[in-house]
Amino acid sequence: MVDQQELRASDRDRQQVVERLRGALEDGRLTMAEYVDRMGAAYQAATYGDLTPLCADLPDSAPGPVPAGPGTAGAPSAVTSRVGYLAGLPLVLKILWTLWLVAVLVNVVVWILVRDPGGHLSYPWPLWVAGPYGAVLFALSASVTLFRRSRPSALSR
């Protein structure tokens, strides 16, 4: 008989472990370096035995079940509230929002520094940087969020 820890893990199993690790990172249970190391190991894992130690020191209340073996879908974990406006967005959108914020802050600082000698602020040109790009990012973020909420979760299948 084959030991369950020696059975091959699927992409779905690896993704569930990465989601659990992400939850542990957001909860402050892992540092960014630990998260990156464990995430890399999860994506390279071939068997359940490779995945199990990655979450062994994490409590079961973290999002996403650890695969217990073949044929077990795992019970859906309790819904956790994630604080932050960017939580739940793909990494690409988080990076774009961060770049947008940095660009807007730089433009506002330059706008304040180049005011006229009388101390009066000139035309608020940083709005032309913040407005259109911010509106596009907002629309993208809202559509991704609505799309993800409308999809049935992978655990309910």
Image: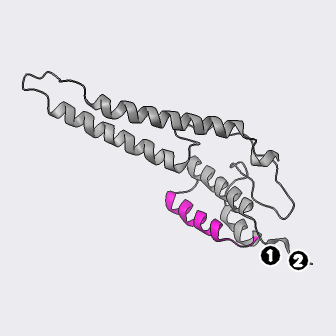
Q: Is residue 77 left or right of residue 122?
A: right
Q: Which residue is mark 1?
A: 6
| Amino acid, disc 1 | Glu
- Residue 2 image label: 2
Taking the magenta stretch, the answer to whether it contains residue 85 is no
Q: Main secondary structure of the magenta part?
A: helix
Which of the labelled discs sits on residue 118, or is there none? none
Farthest residue, direction left: 117
The reply to whether discs 1 and 2 touch (Cβ–Cβ < 8 Å) is yes
**Is the residue 101 above or below the residue 64 in the image?**
above
Residue 52: % across, % down? 73, 66
Q: CA distance from mark 1 to mark 2?
A: 7 Å
Q: Position of residue 105 (x, y in %)?
A: 30, 37
Q: Is residue 99 visible?
A: yes
Residue depicted at 48% across the width and 45% down the height: 94
Q: Secondary structure at mark 2?
A: loop
Hey, what amino acid is under mark 2? Answer: Val
Q: Quadrant of residue 17?
A: bottom right
Magenta segment, which residues? 31-47
Regarding residue 85, the answer to whether it shows in the image is no
